[in-house]
Image (cartoon, grey):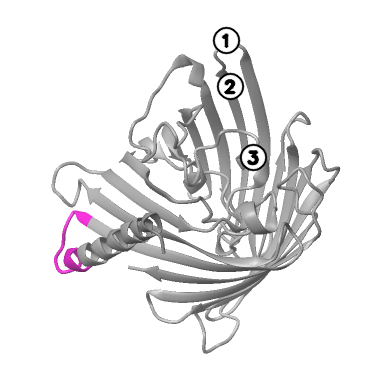
Amino acid sequence: MTTSKMNRFSTAFLLFLTAGLTTYLSAQTTSPLSFNASYIGDWVVNMRGGIKTGSTYLGLANLKIGFDTEKARLWKGGSFFVNAGNTHGGEPSANLVGDFQGVTNIEAGNLTFMYELWYKQQIDKITVTAGLQDLNVDFASTSYGASFNNSSFGIQSSIASNIPSPIFPLTALGVSLQWNISPALSWEVALFDGTPDEYESNPYNVHWKLSKNDGYLAISEWQLSASLLRNLEGKYKFGVYTHRKCDSAQTTFHNYGLYAIADQQIVKTEKGGVGLFSQLGWSPSKNCNNYYCSLGINWQAPFACRENDMCGIAFAYAGIHNNNGVGGELSIEALYKAQLTKNLYLKPDIQYVVNPAGTDAKLPNALVGMVRVGIEF
């Protein structure tokens, strides 16, 4: 192992070790401070097709620190939050599979970075958050889809690929507002820096520069907690976003899009249940990926003796027009998540990618196997 690789893995290990120690200490007494740590490791094997066959390992370590102003006896409804991250290892989509959507949602290269740094204030039914934020935490997310590893089930590709989105791993400064109109209906809106600084100029995402040429990204989302089936849970979201910026020649670029998300429970059992999810996305045809759709099923507690396990299968289709003539990329993912202990899980995963569209070459369909290990404190 080279010195640079040792340094990267050492950074991740120290970040995780520090987080584990502080988590333990904070649990010993009632405190306004909270500490959490997590580590995800993916072993990915491209068994057939794509750019080339082969395997690689990649990991993500996170340290999260929260401060509650009410518990500190300062004022009600306030909270500070810091989330630092380290990614390391290979890049399977870029170097093996060649897919457009991303077979693993932790692929980012070798980076150490500030991921989130914000202050949140709740006043009655309104919550305002300001600072370094991940758009996908509060917008364009599906609770059932979040269990899958493919990046598109986290945030749909028609958003992530068409605008400079403040999402993992490169987040941006922004202000967001949530209004809980009723127990069943809420509205969220946010305004972000339109051009997040690249890691080449801001390697740790701690030196932010704002200029009028950066423009802005504005997003609005309605959320309805309702069910199409009696006595079962459901949540439906509809969002719209617009992005505008200028280049050095003062040429203005404008883009926008729409999306809809559905999470619907269809079976409820004593310890779990079965849920369906779907994502739809659209943007103008000038974009490489101007439409997207997905459909998936999530089964919580598939066995009575394994109430914390889940399994599922999902399909994601990105409508793409590029130089290789591929009309779109279809990713099919099946997984099983085994919760081994309170803090440790194992997630075998297999994906089949039809028409990998992440390069300018026409690639053969890819068959990808993956094992994810997760540790959380």
Residue at image point 53% right, 54% down: 107
Disc 3 is placed on an element classified as loop
The amino acid beneath tag 3 is Ser
Label 3, residues with CA under 10 Å away: few <14, some 14-19, many ≥20: some
The amino acid beneath tag 1 is Gln
Disc 2 is placed on an element classified as strand
Residue 302, position in %: x, y? 60, 81
Looking at the rendered structure, which numbered label has been put on residue 244?
Answer: 2
* CA distance separating discs 2 and 1: 12 Å
Looking at the rendered structure, which numbered label has been put on residue 250?
Answer: 1
Residue 63, position in %: x, y? 32, 56
- N-terminal label among 2 and 1: 2
Residue at image point 18% right, 41% down: 75
Residue 38, position in %: x, y? 37, 63
Residue 128 visible to an observer of this rendering? no
- N-terminal label among 3 and 1: 3
Farthest residue toward the front?
Answer: 2
Residue 367, position in %: x, y? 73, 67
Q: Pointers 2 and 1 in contact (CB under 8 A)?
A: no
